[in-house]
Amino acid sequence: MSEFYTSLGALWPGNDWLTATQALADSKLRDHPHGDLPRWRAALGSLPDTRPSAVLDCSAPKLGPVADDPEGLRAQLMKLHPWRKGPLRLGGVLIDTEWRSDWKWERIAPHIDLADHKVLDIGCGNGYFGLRMLGAGAHFVIGIDPTILFVMQWLACRHFSGDILNYVLPLGVEELPDIPVTFDTVFSMGVLYHRRDPLHHLARIRSMLKKNGSAMVLETLVLPQGRDEELLVPEDRYARMRNVWAVPGLRRLEQWVRAAGFRCVELVDVTATSTKEQRSTEWMRFESLDRALSKQDKARTLEGLPAPVRAVIIARS
């Protein structure tokens, strides 16, 4: 399956960072030990022959023409459950994912210009946002996410879209080579609160941006307004999630971003996550946000902590 990364080098000829990253991705995909890989690969191998096509600038990107056997295709795509980021329409089959990621994109898109940008998307999931970035004019998108199932879902999307310049590599940010690189835009959405050292994460993003005209798009959990200076460090889980190390107030978050070397810091959105935006569906049958909130007080998590609120910051150095 590593042949899917062979075209990466042509995106940025002579770029040592990309050459090293491609080698890492090839090795990781080839040697990944996950026990479900044979089953997922079988599902990919059973996808119907198609004429690749892609309509990207829409809430549910349309990849490929309508399949001759939609129910059979649905059954094969279901074998890649759970689908978390979307919605997506593959071969005419609508995948109603856990997240209405299109809502998040609609909050971000008015504030960015991606025309001809080289983009890095950290924690990209199955590549949904990369599709939307291409639809907004990005030159190419390199997404990284260590969850191998999301790479399999990206390969399913690629089966129908063809060789469009949106990639999902099975890597975490800590695995990226320490080689100079200059992206126009770096996205980090739903990642910061999973990092033990958020300042290091922000500084690493800044180091991967070109010096002039570049931007970081940061989306992360924050405390409700009115608790701007505070920092929540959960003792155990937060909204049933493991590895949530810290949730800052808005002012504290801005201080982190500035401490990482960004000077122009713009808060463009603050939205409480609703059970309409994140929920269980046929395509993600596990428990979702509604099971993580207190039944007595929906403004609180099961642990008695403030319910999820997410902020979007666009920062430039």
Image (cartoon, rainbow, N blue to C red):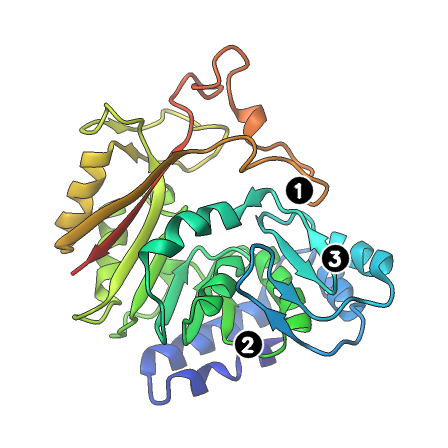
With 95 as the anchor, is 124 left or right in this view? left
Question: Which SS class for mark 2?
Answer: loop
With 122 as the anchor, is 135 left or right in this view? right
Q: Which residue is mark 2?
A: 164
Of tags 3 and 1, the one toward the viewer is 3
* Labels 3 and 1 touching (C-beta < 8 A): no
Question: Which SS class for mark 1?
Answer: loop
Residue 170 in view in this figure: no
**Residue 174, percent across and down?**
35, 59
Residue drawn at point x = 69 percent, y = 38 percent: 285
Quarter that holds the N terminus: bottom right
Given residues 129 and 179, the one toward you in this image is: 129
**Residue 85, percent across and down?**
56, 50
Packing grade of label 1 (10 A; few <14, some 14-19, many >=20) is many
Q: Which residue is mark 1?
A: 284
Q: Which residue is mark 3?
A: 93
Residue drawn at point x = 19 percent, y = 42 percent: 254
Packing grade of label 2 (10 A; few <14, some 14-19, many >=20) is some
Question: Which SS class for mark 3?
Answer: strand
Q: CA gap, disc 2 to disc 1?
A: 26 Å
Residue 155 in view in this figure: yes
**Residue 71, percent across and down?**
85, 56
Q: Residue 211: which quarter of the image?
A: bottom left
With 84 as the anchor, is 186 left or right in this view? left
Which residue type carries mark 3? Val
Lower sequence index among marks 3 and 1: 3
Which residue type carries mark 1? Met
